[in-house]
Image (tube, helix red, strand yellow):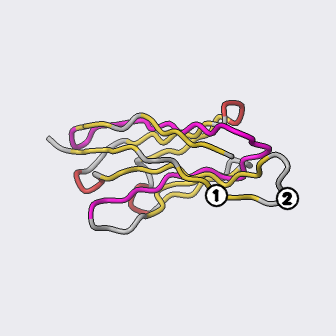
């Protein structure tokens, strides 16, 4: 199995920055893609950013130019650098990974437990 552990959440003032980390561990053969989602109270979970094994990235329109996703393949870790945070971006941020595990013929998607980001003065 695969475990995803997020870190880096916390309280930040509007306009501030945070860097989230997500590390995957377990019986990993290959990580195809990693992504960050967020879910605000009463809202659906939404994709914020994603990065595939080749390095291509995707960003939601609302975060383009402010958020940067990156990945350290050697450490099975993805990062989300968030700048210019807004109060409406207060949410639980979840890490997601599409992984091929050792001995399995196909990939599966795994989720972390989430890390809370609060943007408030």
Q: Residues within 10 Å of mark 2 (few under 14, many from 20)?
A: few
> Would residue 43 be counted in the magenta stretch?
no
Q: Position of residue 23 (x, y in %)?
A: 58, 36
On the image, the x and y values in percent for residue 106 come to 80, 60
* Count of numbered circles on the image: 2
Residue at label 2?
Answer: 105
Q: Main secondary structure of the magenta part?
A: strand
State the SS at label 2.
Answer: loop
Residue 101 circle label: none
Left or right of 12? Residue 48 is right
Question: Going 45% across and 38% down the picture, which residue do you hit?
Answer: 20
Q: Which residues are magenta?
A: 13-41
* In the foreground, 94 or 81: 94
Q: Residue at x 75, y 58 (%)?
A: 107
Callout 1: 10 Å neighbours few (<14), some, many (20+)?
Answer: some
As drawn, is 121 to the left or to the right of 107? left
| Label 1: element kind | strand
Give the answer, above or below, for where 110 lies relative to 82. Answer: below
State left or right for residue 39 relative to residue 29: left
Lateral position of residue 98 relative to residue 79, left or right: right
| Vertical placement of residue 64 versus 82, above or below | below
User: Residue at the location (14% across, 41% down)?
Assistant: 121
What is the residue that sits farthest to the top in this orientation? 75
User: Do the residues bearing badges 2 and 1 touch, measured as CB atoms within 8 Å?
Assistant: no
Rendering coords of residue 71 (x, y %): 62, 39
Residue 72 to residue 92: above or below: above
Q: Residue furthest left?
A: 121
Which residue matches tag 1?
109
Residue at the image position 46 percent from the left and 56 percent from the top: 37
In the figure, residue 74 lies in which quadrant?
Answer: top right
Please say whether residue 20 is one of the residues in the magenta stretch. Answer: yes
């Amino acid at each position: 199995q695969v475990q995803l552990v997020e870190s880096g959440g916390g309280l930040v003032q509007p306009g501030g920055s945070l860097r989230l980390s997500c590390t995957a561990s377990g019986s990993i053969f290959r990580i195809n893609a990693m992504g960050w989602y967020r879910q605000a109270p009463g809202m659906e979970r939404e994709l914020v950013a994603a990065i595939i094994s080749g390095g291509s990235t995707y960003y939601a329109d609302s975060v383009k130019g402010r958020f940067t996703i990156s990945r350290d393949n050697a450490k099975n870790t993805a990062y989300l650098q968030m700048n210019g945070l807004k109060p409406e971006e207060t949410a639980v941020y979840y890490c997601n990974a599409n992984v091929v595990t050792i001995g399995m013929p196909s990939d599966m998607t795994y989720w972390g437990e989430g890390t809370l980001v609060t943007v408030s003065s």
